[in-house]
Image: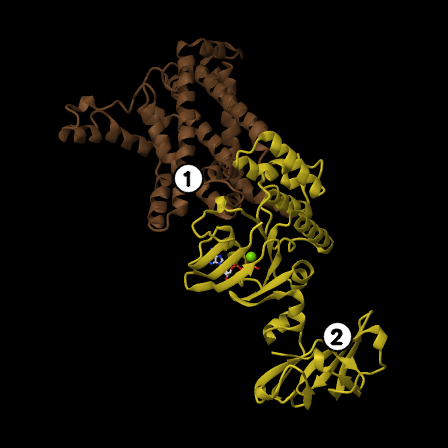
Chain colours: A brown, B yellow
Amino acid sequence: MNRNTAAWLLTAPALIPVLILFFGGFGLGILQSFSFFPLIGLDTPNFSAYTEVLAEDELLLSLVLTLLVSLSATFLTIALAVTAALALRSAERGRRGILFLFQFPITVPHVIIALGALLLLSQSGFAARLTAFFGIISDSTDFPVLVNDRLGLGIIYVYLWKQIPFIGIIALSVLQSMGNDYEELARSLGAKQSQVLFHVILPLMRPALLPGSVLCFAFTFGSYEVPFLLGRSYPSMLPVLVYRYFTNFNLVQRPLAMALAVLITLFLLVTVILYKKFLGGRNRL
Amino acid sequence: MIDLRLKGVSKSYGKNTVVKSLDMKIASGELIALLGPSGCGKTTILKIIAGLQQPDEGTVFFGSQVMNSVPAEKREAVMVFQNYLLFPFMTVEENIAFGLKMRRTDKAVIKERVNEILALIRMEGMGRRKPSELSGGQKQRVALARALVLRPQLLLLDEPLSNLDAHLRDEMRELILRVHREFQVTTVFVTHDQEEAVLLADRIALIFEGNLHQFAPVRDFYERPQSERVASFFGNSNFLKGFCSGQAVETELGAFKTPLTGENESGRTVSLMIRPEHIIPGKGEDNSFLCPIRSKIYMGSFIRYRIEVGEGLWDVIDGPEARKGYEEGESAWFTFPPHMIWLV
Ligand SMILES: Nc1ncnc2c1ncn2[C@@H]1O[C@H](COP(=O)(O)OP(=O)(O)OP(=O)(O)O)[C@@H](O)[C@H]1O
Ligand SMILES: [Mg+2]
């Protein structure tokens, strides 16, 4: 038995359930999205779920909101994480403590953070009461609307909290493996500090940060628990829309959920492929 | 072009003192080798000159100007690093143009200068390639070009030849010499290979553990080394301890005549040294001794004897014209001409 076969056999116990769950579940989902759902008497596949979903008024608003939230969460994540990594790199004292704080959020589930944000930032939350108590605002309802708000600020906040450390640690390790050489070289060639940053350090980090940013984007675009807790009910973000269709007591809505889920998956797939095609292949070290 | 002066420059990392009170003066247009074993502080010295490291003590002068507080990017000194460090996300052209672009040089001028320099390094037509598509030798040349295109006053090269194989090394050496002739740029290059230093440099600064041991024209390292250690680094292994006695050095083998010592130095202990190729097989007028031959190796264009001199073993190199038929095991006459003897 060669090493390859052995490797396959050894990973099989882990791989098979994943494959069954993923492709099995996904396959059923796709069937249902074409309104093939014999359990409730739908046995002729058709496109009706897709046409109905696409005709939905909320869809466009929902798409815009989802894009807005996931793009801004991704960009802010990258910007803040890189800034933090650059600062941490040159920090000599207190570095370990900061690194610990940095790693801590990674271990906390999104839902917990979302609930925490709710407790902290809602108008009846801790921050509102505290500022009202100290007379900074006259009444807790004067506290800015930061959760369940129109722009998804609360959602973005939670994603940032969770993702900045994740990307930050990637950025930090890239910076460290890069060393000072490129920076010194660039300065010797006459680059000022800001030029070193924009013309050398950031481009060198790009290949490592792009996959991370695609991951952030895909995740924020496709996950529902945070927007479910911290978003508005109308328009809601796409994954929440799917969830609403899916949990509707009327099983006839099930194909709508599946159709929308398939559309989201396709959108993300195309995004990743475009990314690979236009950005992924270049800039290899 | 400028001349460069280091005055009392020291640098430590923590408790580890890497450069120790270094004094050096390099004239405008010179080609200088910083030579020394790995870890002796060569790169650190180069970085101090480039402004990438601050000395703990001492002063760096370019001409008469004190440079200590001038940041690297404002110095007319460009450093080429040990491991090329081409920017992987830029083409060859973009790499070469980097410094000019940072100085906001006019685009047309950049293009012209880049093409000029591509021709100089014999890489016309490769400007659009990525560094990953270049050979080691080509990368090294681009790294050099990236510095040269800035027409620096001072060129600092860190081990420019060490990553190259023998054949490419010759080519690169040619290029550095050509560049030096053409631009007359004051050049300091680092190497741990004495042969490389000898082939390239006007003068060599030999450094051990952060100390400058000898800074002199190349010949001096062979003929007038300042210490046994310097001599050994240049392949001198023929030493014999003794003490001065009039115009001779008394050793366990006998008295070696030499013009280098006089009456007033009598009694001083010295190491007597002579290069293997300066020893003449056969009996002469002065300084001839009978020495047992330990081994004889035919090296193609010359013969190398290893002979017993007192307690030690000396090398003798016998060129083809003076070939004597000495054999291993016999004792034979060797002459150590007085004017070839050096004392350290
Ligand atoms: N940033 C640094 N921090 C601490 N120690 C350093 C640093 N840079 C160099 N050193 C130490 O200083 C000494 C000299 O280093 P340097 O790089 O100048 O040597 P070198 O002569 O260039 O060696 P090589 O021929 O191997 O390149 C070494 O012992 C090295 O470990
Ligand atoms: Mg070095």
Residue A184, above or below B203: above
Instruction: Label 2, secondary structure: give it.
Output: helix
User: Amino acid type of disc 2?
Assistant: Glu
User: Amino acid type of disc 1?
Assistant: Gly
- Quarter location, residue B188: bottom right
User: Mark 2 falls within which chain?
Assistant: B
Nearer to the camera, A44 or B197? B197
- Quarter location, residue A72: top left
Where residue B170 appears, as percent x and y from the top left, is 72, 54
Between the residue at mark 2 and the residue at mark 1, the CA separation in whole angstroms equals: 64 Å
Residue A100, above or below A63: below
- What residue is disc 2 on? B277
Mark 2 or mark 1, which is nearer to you?
A: 2
Where residue A270 appears, as percent x and y from the top left, is 54, 23
Q: Residue at x 54, y 28 (%)?
A: A275
Q: Is residue B142 left or right of residue A265?
A: right
Where residue A268 appears, as percent x and y from the top left, is 50, 24
Label annotation for residue A168: 1
Where residue B172 appears, as percent x and y from the top left, is 69, 51
Nearer to the camera, A205 or A125? A205
Q: Residue at x 66, y 51 (%)?
A: B180
User: Mark 1 falls within which chain?
Assistant: A
Q: Are marks 2 and 1 in contact (CB under 8 Å)?
A: no
